[in-house]
Amino acid sequence: MIATAYPPQYYYPNGFVAHQAAAVYGVPCSTSTLFNVHAPVFIPQQASSIRTPIYQERLHANVKVASRPPSKPKQPKYAPRPAGEFLDLDAQTRRNGGTMTKDFYNELTEYVHDHKWKMAPEDFEEMLMGYFNTRNKHLDADSMDLHGLVPFLARNVLEQRKKEVKKGLRPQYLYACTGRGNRSKTGKSVIRETVIDFAEENGYKWCYMPENEGVVVIKFSSGRQ
């Protein structure tokens, strides 16, 4: 069946998608136009009644222009992730439109720490938080990468997250990626201990992510359970 694009006067009204016309009038159309309300609707040559006054009258008298529903903002996940799920922060970053990988982030924060002695304290903190914000901007709403921060900065961002959760802006569950301290001089993650202390001081449930003790899972709810 040969398809022909009719002149603009025979296009459907703006907002009236082609598949709705097909349902009302039984007129086949190209699937490429299903959700492109500005594109011409392709009508088979046999459907010459499209040109008739009767069709035009039915179109304007009986068809209500259906506007495309507004897109809903993405809602944060308010449930824990499935058991056994691998927390891939780089995959989250790519999915959410970011470009800063874990390795690049770690290189930047390590450089800042190595040159800390050259910086004023406020500059050191500002650079770390700048890289932290860039890294975490494109993670999922329930994830946070705390690598590279010093304990008091980690506590500050956790306090900020607590306020956001109370306002309903963030999920109750937080997957705080701290690492296990394998590269630290003591062999322990100071940031991980800071996160655990924060959870216990506030009475939040916490646990290590299954098969990954470098991620601390916190449930932001009052009272231990």
Image (cartoon, rainbow, N blue to C red):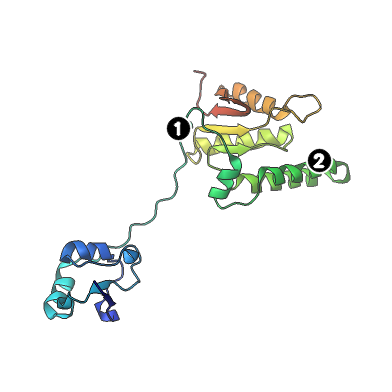
Given the current orientation, which residue lies at the most extreme right position?
Answer: 118
Image coordinates for residue 168, horizontal then vertical, percent: 47, 39
Is 70 left, or right, of 42 in this rendering?
Answer: right
Q: Position of residue 48 (x, y in %)?
A: 16, 78
In the picture provided, is 65 more to the left or to the right than 84? left
Q: Amino acid at mark 1?
A: Ala
Gap between marks 2 and 1 measured at Cα: 36 Å
- Does any portion of residue 12 appear in the rendered image? no
Q: Residues within 10 Å of mark 1 (few under 14, many from 20)?
A: few
Question: Could you tell me which secondary element the residue under label 2 belongs to?
Answer: helix
Q: Residue at x 85, y 46 (%)?
A: 119
Type of amino acid at the residue the image marks with label 2: His
Q: Nearer the viewer, residue 88 or 61?
A: 88
Is residue 122 rendered to the left or right of residue 30? right
Q: Is residue 195 above or below residue 139?
A: above
> Residue 35: x percent and y percent?
34, 62
Q: Which residue is located at x 26 percent, y 80 percent?
A: 9
Decide: marks 2, 1 in contact (CB < 8 A)? Answer: no
* Rendered view: 98 above or below 59: above
Disc 2 marks which residue? Answer: 113
**In this view, which residue lies farthest toward the front?**
1
Q: Mark 2 or mark 1, which has the lower sequence index? A: 1
Residue at the disc numbered 1: 79
Task: Residue 111: tell me if it is visible.
Answer: yes
Q: Is residue 23 above or below residue 106?
A: below
